[in-house]
Amino acid sequence: MATTRRWQQYSLSRIEALLLVAIAVATVIYFGVLHYLDGRAATYFANLRQTDPAFYLSQLRESQGFADYLAEYRDMEGYVSFKPAAPSFLVGRWTLREEPLRLSPGTAPEQCTDPVTFDYGILLMLESGGSTLRVTYRIEGDTVLLKSAGIGTFSVKLVSYGSQLDHIEFQPPGLSKTYFAYNCGR
C-alpha cells in the first residue's frame, strides 16, 4: 500500500515534462516527414508510369512485390482480354516437376527435363506428348489463363515470393495431374 500512495503523490519534474514534450514533438515531426516522403514517392511513381513504363514496372516489382506488379502489368500491357503475346515473365522454357523444388531466387534447375515452352501464340509440349498448341493469354489475379481452340481455357498459377516469380503450377493439356514448373531458359 505504501508504494500505491507514493505513485498517487508523484508529480513530474520540470526535466521529465520537457522530455515528454520533446518526445511528442519529435514523434509528430517524424510522422509528418514520413507523410511528405510518401507523397513524393507517389508523385515519382505516377510520373515514372507516364514517362518510362518499363522502368516503372521494374521499380514497382522491386518495391512492392510481384502481386502488385502483376496487377499493374495486366492493366498496362492489355492482358485484361486474351491476346497472343505471352507475358514477358512467362516466355521461355519451363521444366515440369512432380514435386516442388527448393531453389534460391533467380537460379534455374540443373537439368531442364520434360520442358514446356511458352512463346508468342504457342505452347510447346514436345517431350510430354509432342504437341504444339496455338494459345492466347490473359491475366486474372495471380493466374494466367490460356485459351486454345478445341481444348478451351486452362490456368497457370503463378507462385511468387517477394518480387520474384518462383515457379508456376498447372495441368498441361493431355496430362492428368498438376505439375510444378521452373524456368530453365528464356
Image (tube, grey):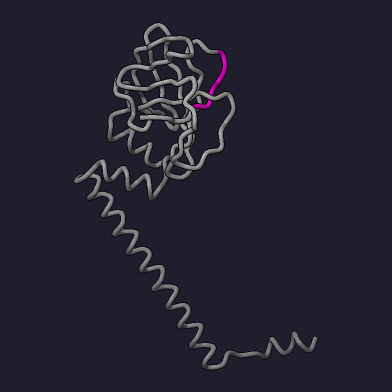
Q: Position of residue 65 (x, y in %)?
A: 42, 45
Q: Does 116 sit above or below residue 76?
A: above
Looking at this rendering, what residue extends furthest in the front direction?
Answer: 110
Which residue is drawn at the image coordinates 46% and 31% (left, top)? 158
- Relative vertical location of residue 37 with respect to residue 13 in this rendering, above or below: above
The residue at the far right in this view is: 1
Reply above or below: 124 against 19: above
Q: Nearer the viewer, residue 153 or 104?
A: 104
Highlighted range, magenta: 176-181
Q: Position of residue 11 (x, y in %)?
A: 61, 90
Magenta residue check for 43:
no
Magenta stretch encompasses residue 178: yes
Q: Is residue 68 left or right of residue 100?
A: left
Looking at the image, which residue is at 48% across and 36% down? 166
Q: Residue at x 34, y 29 (%)?
A: 87
Indicate the quadrant where residue 80 lies: top left
In the rendered image, residue 140, in percent from the top left (x then y), is placed at 41, 28
Tally of numbered tags: 0
Q: Quadrant of residue 31?
A: bottom left
The residue sitting at 51% across, 82% down in the picture is 20
Q: Residue furthest left?
A: 51
Q: Nearer the viewer, residue 94 or 33?
A: 94
- Is 60 displayed left or right of 102 in the figure? left
Relative depth, front residue between 27 and 9: 27
116, above or below 50, in the image: above
